[in-house]
């Protein structure tokens, strides 16, 4: 059966999901049409506020039967248009599935619905003495969104990324079938790793409706170091020295004074020690004060030996929060410094960071456009923001395309990848295609066709 | 074109790979027909001793065109028949691709060919001050084999499994296409995770011809504790207490006195402190002697509080090697204690280990068959060996099937998975099918068909 018009979608879906969970086209808020970046806009024909795995399964069965595009959305904090219903159809809003279902202290797992916010997981676990290590900057993202992009964040260097903390998933396939992948087990060599295939697939291969996460015990003690350097070359060349010391910091962040200035202007606050060119911001955590102190003292020495201008120990919580809050707000601060922006979330081998940053600075000069940035230099994941400022539409588009082309080409040249943690969505699809072997893209397409033969689940994203 | 007979395979392949790298049917050694377990036997029609990615690609193009089954083999140390050419055809022997290609000290990576042995990687890295943490028992396995089963081993509890140490792969697809997956990058959210799909797929989705592994810095100091308990219940109930202490041991192994006895008989040596019922064997490592000592002393105390009969500190290397060598030889020792055996490599939630071991003991009694075992109790991965002893063919088959049915059913019941680290191969295929949702098996089949439409690469394995 073919659908006659958009109103039919409502009729058919209302047979399996109560009407009060549905929002029809005319009543859909603009918010459902864009994500945090805001550069892509399209409204769905119907929003389904799902309450259960069964809701999602029932809706996907209909979508599959009638070949209606379906897209999943959490908190809408994405940056690449991954959750936008660019072909209309059904938007499945999972933000209402926000229950924490079980903390299993023997198996060190936390089972949650996909709409639970990252900050709520963090708080819930820590209150009970446990710790969920992944730490993406956007704490109001849902865990479902984190899983769909394999979100990384600040602590990847010591603890890994979201993928490393997903033990099990309940996934609704494009057909509506419900699949249980993984389990509360620490090892698994039982068939193809569909769990990791779904993680990072940005809602194109399946819909995560429940996740069992790995927890660790909460570190008792945390300290950060703010380490200014005269220039970015000396800051970044210190990173491999730190990593070979045998001490693994929780985080190694890098930023320059322009980001600090944007933040001061944006927040109206004063950044501590804001009179330097370049900074590394390091964190250390552990179960014992003495060990953490011993560790950061050794690293502080290494920093001095490698040209640090100073080492500020942020050992009281207020000061530490101040600096990390600033770090977490750099994106917003840069956004507020310009009329419009877009971003590059490239990840490069750690040995190539200096080369890539140098190239970005040169590109900004040559293209006469601002490209402020900062990055997780402990893991080679850099964020650069191309700022429109006062350029007219045509010039902006041209310059943005030029910069994207140049930076992604350079990223590929140095052995990097298009996205370290924000995903591909719609915005970076073209550059993913240029970055990977044709054979790889073609294999991804084959897998997508096999999993979603009618191409209804988040169509035209990623590949 | 259809192949007329088996000799044609030789003719066609010899057009793309030099004859000296080919072994024809009549000259193929029996060794190519079985793996370490030895319960499944079949010879291929042709062995290709591949020397390069290009060799593998050329052979797969032919296999794909003429629809000839192709199976990959490394050192043949598998336990589930994964590398047996059960349909004849071409066996691609990668053991000759055994070069270590690059150690990158800035990016902390080691790039190797798939035929390099685990023990050679270990030795090479450690000589240079680095460390490859995964530690499967079989050190003479190839890294390609480790990747194909996502091998786990002793150190998974602290360091993770093989999957966690693979940064990049060069993979030849069933079509012969060469794919580069991942890179020397620490994070990656760039398209579907084909790298993890290939890892653990037991040579059914692609052939790994190069791998870039993550290294860490070598821990300076290692200590083991041998901790006897009166019974397995008190030994194993101590494990979650240890894991919640905030100290993560490198390894937490469990075994009973029967394994010790088999080993003493097998090796002709004497196990230290062999007068106890049940043991935990723990390891601790780190960069500082003081910290490691502090850690193991705290854990030793916890063990005493939870019923340990004693705690033997194995702090000199000779003693430690003696115990770990014994632990590493338990499989062989059990094998030599009987006429034939088969194994269960189940992984269960850590909270269900006691329940599962109790069930296994009960099953052994009820079925009147020996099922000695041991396990990585830090991660819930248990190895049980069903011993034929003097049963005749028919009785053995019946009892073996009964035990498999009973143990895998129980494994599923307690939330476990069929294989923790040895894979599914041919031997466990039926039980994987019973263990997973139909929707999951069906999705695995769809993925297999998409990647290998002619079903030529290691056909009929896993699913």
Image (cartoon, coloured by chain):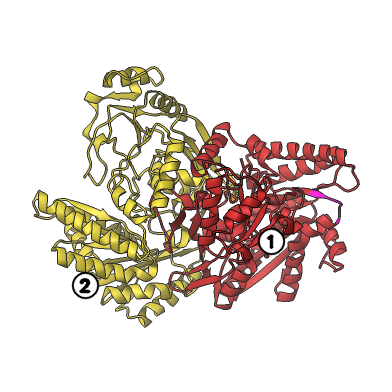
Chain colours: A yellow, B red
Do discs 2 and 1 share a chain?
no
Image quadrant in which the C terminus of chain B is located: top right
Q: Where's residue B3, x and y in %?
A: 60, 45
Question: Is disc 1 placed on a helix, strand or loop?
Answer: loop
Instruction: Identify which residue, B69 or B442, lies in the foreground.
Output: B69
| Residue A65 - label | none
Q: Where's residue B382, x and y in %?
A: 70, 50
Magenta span: chief secondary structure? loop
Badge 2 density bin: few <14, some 14–19, many ≥20, Cα 10 Å = few
Query: Is B413 drawn above or below residue A232 in the view shown?
Result: above
Disc 2 vs disc 1: Cβ atoms closer than 8 Å?
Answer: no
Chain containing mark 1: B
Residue B135 visible within the image: no
Which residue was labeled with disc 1?
Answer: B137
Q: Where's residue B70, x and y in %?
A: 60, 50
Image quadrant in which the N terminus of chain B is located: top right
Instruction: Identify which residue, B289 or A25, lies in the foreground.
Output: A25
Chain containing mark 2: A
Q: Where's residue B90, x and y in %?
A: 63, 52
Q: CA distance from mark 2 to mark 1?
A: 55 Å
The magenta segment is: B337-341
Q: Residue at x 32, y 42 (%)?
A: A82
> Does the magenta-highlighted stretch encompass residue B338?
yes
> Does the magenta-highlighted stretch encompass residue B232?
no
Q: Is residue A442 left or right of residue B432?
A: left
Q: Is residue B138 left or right of residue B178?
A: right
Among the 4 quarters of the image, the one containing residue B287: bottom right
Among the 4 quarters of the image, the one containing residue A321: bottom left
Residue found at the far bottom of this picture: A305
Residue B15 visible within the image: yes
Q: Residue at x 38, y 34 (%)?
A: A455
| Residue A275 - label | 2
């Amino acid at each position: 059966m073919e659908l006659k018009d958009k109103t039919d979608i409502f009729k058919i879906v209302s047979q399996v999901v109560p009407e009060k969970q549905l929002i029809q086209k005319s009543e859909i808020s603009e918010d459902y049409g864009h994500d945090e970046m805001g550069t892509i806009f399209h409204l769905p024909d119907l929003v389904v506020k799902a309450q259960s795995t069964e809701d999602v399964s029932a809706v996907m069965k209909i979508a599959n039967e009638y070949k209606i595009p379906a897209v999943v959305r959490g908190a809408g904090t994405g940056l690449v248009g991954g959750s936008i219903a660019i072909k209309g159809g059904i938007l499945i809003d999972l933000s209402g599935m926000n229950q924490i279902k079980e903390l299993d202290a023997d198996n060190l797992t936390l089972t949650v619905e996909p709409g639970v916010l990252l900050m709520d997981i963090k708080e819930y676990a820590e209150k009970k003495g446990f710790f969920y290590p992944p730490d993406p900057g956007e704490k109001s993202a849902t865990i479902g969104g984190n899983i769909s992009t394999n979100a990384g964040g600040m602590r990847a260097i010591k603890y890994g990324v979201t993928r490393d903390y997903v033990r099990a998933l309940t996934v609704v396939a494009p057909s509506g079938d419900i699949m249980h992948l993984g389990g509360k087990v620490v090892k698994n060599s039982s068939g193809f790793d569909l769990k990791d295939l779904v993680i990072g697939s940005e809602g194109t291969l399946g819909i995560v409706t429940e996740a069992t996460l790995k927890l660790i015990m909460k570190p008792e003690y945390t300290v950060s170091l703010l380490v200014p350097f005269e220039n970015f070359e000396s800051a970044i060349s210190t990173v491999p020295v730190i990593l070979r010391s045998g001490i693994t910091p929780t985080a190694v962040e890098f930023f320059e004074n322009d980001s600090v200035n944007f933040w001061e202007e944006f927040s109206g606050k004063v950044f501590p020690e804001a009179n330097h060119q370049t900074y590394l911001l390091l964190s250390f955590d552990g179960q014992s004060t003495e060990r953490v102190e011993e560790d950061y003292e050794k690293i502080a020495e290494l920093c001095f030996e490698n040209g640090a201008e100073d080492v500020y120990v942020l050992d009281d919580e207020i000061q530490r929060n101040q600096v990390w809050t600033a770090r977490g707000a750099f994106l917003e601060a840069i956004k507020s410094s310009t009329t419009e922006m877009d971003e590059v979330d490239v990840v490069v081998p750690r040995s190539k960071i200096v080369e890539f940053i140098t190239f970005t600075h040169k590109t900004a000069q040559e293209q006469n456009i601002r490209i402020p940035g900062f990055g997780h230099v402990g893991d080679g994941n850099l964020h650069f923001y191309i700022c429109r400022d006062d350029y007219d539409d045509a010039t902006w588009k041209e310059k943005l395309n030029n910069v994207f082309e140049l930076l992604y080409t350079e990223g590929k040249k140095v052995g990097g990848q298009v996205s370290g943690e924000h995903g591909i969505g719609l915005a970076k699809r073209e550059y993913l295609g240029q970055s990977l072997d044709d054979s790889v893209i073609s294999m991804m397409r084959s897998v997508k066709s096999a999993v979603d033969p009618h191409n209804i689940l988040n169509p035209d994203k990623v590949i």
